[in-house]
Amino acid sequence: MPLLSKVVSFDYNKHLPQSSSEKTSDLFFLVTALFIANSKDKEITKLTLQKTLFQSVQSLAAKDISFLNTFFFINTYGPFNNIFYQYMEGLEQADLVKTEGKTIDLTAKGLRVVSDLLSEISQDTEMQTVLLDLEQRVERYAGDPTKAINETHALRVIDTTNNQKVKTIKELIKELNPEQKFITGTQFKYIEPNKKPSKRVQAPAKTINELEEILAKVEPSDYEKTSDLSLLFS
């Protein structure tokens, strides 16, 4: 039986990308999920996209694999990180993604770019395991946000900040003060695997370089060189 994930206090050195390449690797998996949704003719919202990525993180951790460097915290939406919204804004500025109401999709340019990037991905077993899991999650949740919410909020985790109690995500949400002003993600509890996976899958260096070149015209948030968390949570 897989170990339950745990909720912990925020740790800057564990729960956020520590370099531009780690951030770009996360962007690659984000746009890959959007590419899968588009290829399956599925609509996906920003919130459902986060649920999809989160569930893939949980599923793959049980296989001793990690792939995202941006972790999720518990807020009123469930597992969430507002930084993903910043990521998507940057992708929109680069004309790779577009939003229509709550729905997010790749632009024609984005489809071409991601198709090219994926064509260069090796048949490495662990990378293919990540891509297959993303595909399965997208097919399961895109177009069905209720299922995404219900299944995600039913997950049980160990609250290390409260005497190792086992709680559901839904119970953790109920513990939040809805009137508490959102300041930064650091005020919330973060979710991480009970045991750090030994296999770390990241986008290949060539893929990262190509994607960074495309994004080069978009002014970056150089957060990896600063301890000012306002750059991450503004």
Image (spheres, rainbow, N blue to C red):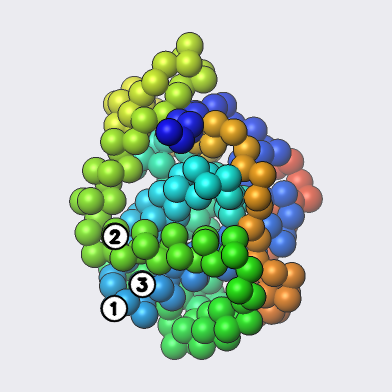
| Gap between marks 1 and 2 measured at Cα | 13 Å
Residue for badge 1: 41
Dots 3, 1 in contact, CB < 8 A: no
Circle 2 Cα neighbour tier, 10 Å, few/some/many (<14 / 14–19 / ≥20): some
Tell which tag, 1 or 2, sits nearer the viewer.
2
Residue for badge 2: 140
Residue type indicated by callout 3: Ala
Circle 3 Cα neighbour tier, 10 Å, few/some/many (<14 / 14–19 / ≥20): many
- Taking the spot 29% from the left edge, 59% from the top edge, the residue there is 141
- Taking the spot 70% from the left edge, 38% from the top edge, the residue there is 13
Residue 6 at what x, y percent from top left?
50, 29
Give the vertical position of 31 relative to 195 (above or below). Answer: below
Left or right: 63, with 106 as reference point: right
- Taking the spot 45% from the left edge, 24% from the top edge, the residue there is 158
| Gap between marks 3 and 1 measured at Cα | 6 Å
Give the vertical position of 179 relative to 66 (above or below). Answer: above
Q: Is residue 129 visible?
A: yes
| Gap between marks 3 and 2 measured at Cα | 10 Å
- Taking the spot 44% from the left edge, 60% from the top edge, the residue there is 133
Question: How many numbered marks are there?
Answer: 3
Lower sequence index among marks 1 and 2? 1
Residue for badge 3: 37
Residue type indicated by callout 2: Arg
Dots 1, 2 in contact, CB < 8 A: no
Residue 157 at what x, y percent from top left?
42, 29
Residue 164 at what x, y percent from top left?
48, 16
Residue 63 at what x, y percent from top left?
53, 47
Q: Is residue 23 visible?
A: no
Closest to the observer, 185 or 110: 110
